[in-house]
């Protein structure tokens, strides 16, 4: 005769489910007292993709003359991120680099960060990339470093964060 399989008892399963529900409720109640990150300038944008970045630690601003005037006043460069909600690279960067506090500190310290939705500003994208193949070659995400007068200093695609656990190469 085969040994009978014994499964978890009803009491154990019920207790585990109850514990998970109570913990979830506790987190929800506690979150009311945690400080909420203030939205950046993208909170009022038309594009839902741009609005989705409004709570990231990077102080994103929309593409405008004001961004370049602010760069002149603060003596910073302008970092333009041309991204898209349909780009895998853009989504990964939203989850990894753009939410990393150290990365955000570096960007906010040295740049006026401008975020552009590639589908909401096709004219700008066409003008900057010279051809659509450049944007496709970078996985749908492109980064421009501009001076305060709008002159292109550098252009590149997404780069992985370099940490001790992630050496270059």
Image (cartoon, helix red, strand yellow):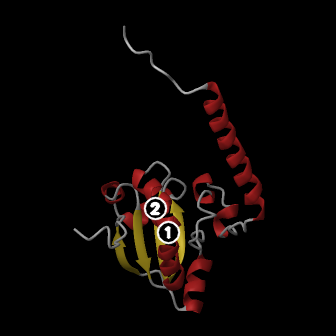
Q: Nearer the viewer, residue 84 or 13?
A: 13
Occupied quadrant, residue 18? top right
List the single residue furthest toward the top: 1
Label 2, label 1: how far apart the Cα atoms are = 6 Å
Q: State the count of labels.
A: 2
**Residue tagged 1:** 100
Give residue 56's position: percent from left, percent from top: 58, 66
Give residue 93's position: percent from left, percent from top: 45, 60
Occupied quadrant, residue 58? bottom right
Give residue 27's position: percent from left, percent from top: 70, 54
Q: Residue at 52% x, 73% y: name it.
A: 101
Judge the density around disc 1: few (<14), some (14-19), many (≥20) Cα neighbours within 10 Å.
some
Occupied quadrant, residue 164? bottom left
The secondary structure type at the circle numbered 2 is: loop
Judge the density around disc 2: few (<14), some (14-19), many (≥20) Cα neighbours within 10 Å.
few
Instruction: Answer left or right for 153 relative to 20.
Output: left
Tell me the quadrant of the picture where the N terminus can be found. Answer: top left
Q: Nearer the viewer, residue 74 or 34?
A: 34
Judge whether 142 appears above or below 5 on screen.
Answer: below
Tell me the quadrant of the picture where the C terminus can be found. Answer: bottom left
Give residue 153's position: percent from left, percent from top: 37, 81
- Report the disc number at residue 157: none
Please report contact status of discs 2 and 1: CB closer than 8 Å, yes or no. yes
Q: Nearer the viewer, residue 147 or 33?
A: 33
Q: Residue at 59% x, 26% y: name it.
A: 9
The secondary structure type at the circle numbered 1 is: loop
Instruction: Answer left or right for 97 relative to 57.
Output: left
Q: Nearer the viewer, residue 164 or 39?
A: 164
**Residue tagged 2:** 96
Judge whether 147 appears above or below 160 on screen.
Answer: below
Q: Residue at 41% x, 72% y: name it.
A: 144
Q: Residue at 31% x, 67% y: name it.
A: 166
């Amino acid at each position: 005769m085969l040994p009978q399989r014994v499964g978890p008892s009803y009491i154990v399963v019920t207790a585990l489910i109850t514990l998970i529900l109570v913990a979830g409720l506790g987190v929800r109640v506690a979150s009311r007292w945690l400080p909420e990150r203030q939205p950046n300038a993208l909170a009022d944008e038309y594009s839902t993709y741009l609005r989705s970045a409004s709570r990231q630690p990077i102080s994103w601003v929309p593409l405008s003359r004001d961004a370049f005037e602010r760069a002149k006043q603060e003596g910073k460069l302008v970092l333009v991120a041309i991204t898209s909600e349909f780009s895998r690279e853009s989504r990964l960067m939203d989850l990894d680099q753009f939410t990393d506090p150290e990365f955000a500190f570096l960007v906010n310290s040295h740049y006026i960060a401008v975020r552009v939705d590639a589908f909401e500003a096709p004219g700008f994208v066409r003008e900057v990339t010279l051809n659509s193949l450049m944007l496709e070659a970078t996985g749908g995400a492109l980064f421009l470093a501009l001076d305060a007068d709008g002159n292109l200093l550098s252009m590149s695609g997404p780069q992985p964060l370099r940490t001790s656990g992630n050496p270059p190469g």
